[in-house]
Amino acid sequence: MSSIPVPGNTLYKASSLPVETRIDSLLALMTPEEKAGQLNQVFSGHDPKMLPELYPELRAGGIGSFIWAMGNPGMRKKLPDGSVALRNQIQQAAVEESRLGVPVLFGMDIIHGASTVFPSALGLACAFEPTLFERSQAVAAREARATGLEWVFAPMCDLARDPRWGRVVETCGEDPYLSSLCNAAQVRGFQGDSVAAKDKVAACLKHYLGYSAVTGGRDKNGTDLDEWSLQNLHLPAFRASVDAGAMTVMSAFNEIDGVPVVANHHVLTEILRGQLGFKGFVVSDWGAVSQMLIWGYAKDNADATRLALAAGNDMDMLSKAFVKHLPGLLKAGTLSQEVVDEAVRRVLRVKFMVGLFEQPYADESACVLSPPRPADVALARECAAKSVVLLKNEGEILPISRDIRKIALIGPFADAPKEMLGAWDGHGEWAVTLASGLREKFASASITVVKGCDVSVTPRIKTLQDGSVVPDDSEPPVTGDLESSAAVEAAEAADLVVMALGEPRGWTGEGGSRISLSLAGNQQALFDAVAATGKPIVSIIFSGRPLALPAVWKESAAVLYAWQPGCQAGPGLADLLAGDVAPTGRLSMSVPYEVGQCPIYYNHYRTGLPCDGALGFRDSGVSHAKYWFGHGLTYTEFAYGPVRVIPAAAGKPATAVATVSNVGRREGEELVQLYIGQLYCHEGVRPLQELRGFQRVTLKPGETREVRFQLTDEALGHFDRRGGFKVDQAEFQVWIAPHARVGTPAVHSTDPVPKTEDPVEADPEAVCFGCDRGSWSVVSVSFDSPYTNSGMAGVKKLLDDNPKTYWHTYHQDKKVSAPPHEVVFDMGRELMVAALTMTPRRSSDFGCAGVPDQCEFHLSLDGKAWTFAARGDFQGLATNPCRQVVTLATPVKARFLRFVATRVANDESCVVVAGIGVVEAPRLDSEVNISSYMFSI
Ligand code: BGC
C-alpha cells in the first residue's frame, strides 16, 4: 500500500475489518477529486505501452478502473508480451504512489472465453444446458484472472428478437426463461462462491436495459419499449442474474421512453435497485455519458455527469465527464454529496470484495495463455457439439457411415480457424477447423477441401469523437471471387459433399446489423453450382445469427447449424457427423423464411386475429418461422402423446403429463419442452406461448416414457408493471412439445369462476388466412355445392388462397342434399397425424347459421381403406371463427384425410367451413415443421 502518509483514520487498510467499516474509513478521507477518480474508467488506445502516459493521473488518484489495459480483444490481438507486467506497473502507480493507494480495477470483454474460446452465447444457449455456461465461464474466469483481470463485461442478458441486429450472437436467444437460466449460470461461473478467489472475476450484466430492442435491428437505434414488455421480456434475465449475485451492471446505449438509459432514473434506480434489489455498481457503456450530447438529451458534459449520477449510473466508461465535472458540480451544489458518496461506496465495495486491497498485483509467472488445459479443450469440444442444431436430416443421411470413401468439403468456412472463434475471441489464438476435424475422424476416407470462394474482412477500426480508436464492424467485408469449378469437380468425384457456409464473424457483434439474411459474398452461387451436381449435400452453417437460406434448406439432404463454435469447432462437428455424439442442440432463436418477417419470435402476443397466431403477409403464404425456437432433430424420431393436466391436490401443484416415444431406429435423447399460454389476463395481453421448463429423456427404439412437469407458480406467473410476480386466476394452455408452436395443448385453470361461453365475434376476413397448405389437393366430394360452383371445382377453389372463397354447401336459392357431406383430401405425402382441426366460419355472413357442429375425420394410407380417426363436436361454436382441435389418442400415419360433416346446426343443409387441418406429430419429416396445413377462406 501507499508509502505516502495519509492523515486520519486508515482503518480501510485492515483486512480483518468488515467491508462496510473499511469503506466508511476510506470515504471519509477522500477529496471530491479522488471520489471522481474512482468513478472514472479509462482506456489507453490499442498500445498498452502508452499506458505510462496516464501515470500522473493515477498518482493523483484520478483513475478508478482500466478497460482493455492488457490489449484489445476486439482487435483479435493476442495478449501482448509483458502486458501483465505492465498492468502491475499501473497498479503500482495507483497503490504505492497515490495518496490513498486505492487499487485500480481492471476490466475486459471476456465474453465466451479468454484463451480457450467456447461457442458464442447464442450457439451455446442451443445446448439448453445452463451448466455448460457455468463451466465454460469458470474456465474463462480462471484464465482472465491469471492475466490480471478482476472484472469481465459479461454476460449479455439482452433478449434476441431480431436477427438483423448483429449482437444477437452475444445473447442467449429469444426466450426470457432460457436466457435467465443461461445468464445466471454465467454469473455463477465467473464469480463462484467468492469473487476474491484467484480464479474468479466480477461479472457485469449488460446491456441494461432494452439494447436489443433497437428498432429495425439497427444497432444503437432508439427503442419502442413499454413497461409491460420490460417486465416480462427484457428484465427476467437481468433479474435472475442479479439474484445469482452479479456485482456490476453496464447501462445500455439506448433510450427507453425517450430517456437515455445512462440517465434514466426509473430504469437504473427504481427498477434495478428498487425492484431487482441490485447492490453493486453500474458502469456506463462506451462513452455513453458524453453520447447524451449527441442524443440531444444533455446540454454539455457537466449536465451529462449530473444527469447520469443522479439517475444511478456510478462509473463513467471513457467519457471522462465525471472526472472533469463532478468536483465542480458538488461545489455548486447541483449534485448531491449523498449521490456521489453512494456511487463511490458501490465501486469501492466491489474492489474490496474482489480482494484488490489485499492482492493488487497479478502473478506474472502464473499467467496462463495458450495452449488451454486438456480438460478445458475437452469442455470446448463438448460445448461445440452440444451447441450445433440439426435442422434437417433427409433419409437419415447423417451420421456419415465410417465406410465412406470420398468426401468433398467445400466452402470458405471449411478451413478458416479464426472464423470459428466468433464475435469476441478473448485472447484465443488457435482453433481446430472442420477440415482438420474431418480428416482426423474419417482417417481412411479421401477428403478434398475446396474453399470455392473467399470471405475476407476489411480492417475494422474507427475513431470516436474523443479520439480513441475502436473496432468497427460497420464496414462490410470484401468478398472474394467465385471459383466454383474446383468445387464442382470435387463434388462430382465424391460420395458425399459437406458444405461449410455462412457469414464472417466480422459481420456479427457490435455494429453488425444486416439488411439481408443471406450467405455472405458468392457463397449462394457456389452452393447452387455444387447442388446442381445432384450429389447429396450436408450443409454446415457458421453464423452469428439465424440466416434465411431457402435454397440451402431445400437442396441439402442435411443441415447442421453450427453458429460460431469456438476453438474446438472441427472435433465437435466431426463427433456429430460421425455419430459418436448425437445432436441434441435446439434453436435458441427462431429461423425466419425471409428477412421481411423479422423480427420474428415464437412468443409474440396472443393477437385478436388471426386466432392461431399465424401472422402472415399478403404477398407470401408464409406466416410462421421456417424453424421455430426449440426446434432441433436428433438421430432418431420421437412422437408425443396428448397432454393432460392432473389437478392440484393436497398442497401439490397441478402436473402436466405426456408420453414421449422413440419411434425411430436408434437410441436417442429428446429435449422435452413445457410451454404455457395464459388465455386471459386483465393486466395486459400475454404471449401465445412461453417456455417454462424442459427435461431430457433418453429412450431406446420403441420405448415410451411419461414426462411430467409441475405447474408451479413459477411456471404460470408473470410480472406486473411494478415488478411484482403473480399468478392470475385464469385459464392456461399447456403444451408438452418438442419445440415452440407445435402440438396440441391441454387447458389448466386456476380460475374458480367458470367462464361464460359467449361466442367471440371476430373479423372473418382474417381467419387463419395465410397458413401453409403444403401440397394438399381435393380428391373427391360427396355433394354438389351451388355456392362454390359445383362439386370438386368449388372445393378446389378453397385452395386458391382467395379469402373470398370457402366451402359452403348452402345457397338461399338452391338447397343441396342433406348431410353427411364429405370431402377427401390427398395430403401429398404420408404424415404422422397427431390431431385434426376444423375452423368454422362466422355463419352470419352467409344468411344461414350452420356449421358442422358434429363431424368425423377418417384417415387412410392409400385412399381406399379408411380408419375412423376422431369425432369433433363443435356445438355452440357457430360464430367463433377460431380453430378447434381434436387430438388423437395416438398418432396415425396417413396420406388421405376424409372430413365428414355429420350434423349441421340450425339449418340442416348448410356447411360453412373455413379450414381443415392436420397437426403433424413432430419428426416424421424434418423438412416440414409447420404444424398444420389448412385451407382458408
Ligand atoms: C459494447 C460493450 C462492451 C464495451 C467495452 C461497448 O461498445 O457495447 O458490450 O463491453 O464496449 O468493450
Image: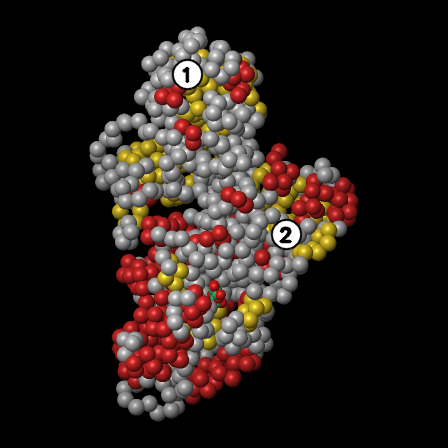
**Relative to 264, 918 lies left or right:** right
Q: Which mark is in front, 1 or 2?
A: 1
Residue drawn at x 51%, y 35% as measured from the top left: 618
Q: Residue at x 48, y 85 (%)?
A: 55
Q: Is residue 647 left or right of residue 623?
A: left
**Residue 323 numbered mark, or none:** none
Residue depicted at 54% across the width and 36% down the height: 619
Q: Secondary structure at mark 1?
A: loop
Q: How is the image coloured?
A: secondary structure
Q: Is mark 2 within 8 Å of ligand 1?
A: no
The residue depicted at 65 percent of the width and 49 percent of the height is 500
Element on which disc 2 rests: loop
Residue 353 shows in this picture: no
User: Relative to the observer, which residue lies in front, 589 or 266?
Assistant: 266
Q: Which residue is mark 1?
A: 911
The image shows residue 368 at horizontal and vertical percentages of 54, 70
Q: Amino acid at mark 1?
A: Val
Q: Is residue 735 above or below residue 571?
A: above
Residue 31, position as x, y percentages in the image:
32, 84
- Please say whether residue 506 is visible from this viewpoint: yes
Please give the residue where the numbered disc 2 appears in the rendered image. Answer: 520
Find residue 926 and report its image quarter: top right
View extreme (top): residue:
817
**Location of the N terminus (image quadrant):** bottom left
Q: Quadrant of residue 455?
A: bottom right
Reply above or below: 833 against 364. Answer: above
- Farthest residue, direction front: 813
Q: Which amino acid is tagged 2?
A: Ala
Rendered location of residue 695, percent (x, y): 42, 43
Dot 1 or dot 2, earlier in sequence: 2
How busy is the neighbourhood of tag 2: few (under 14 within 10 Å), some, or many (20 plus)? many
- Camera-nearest residue between 119 and 214: 214
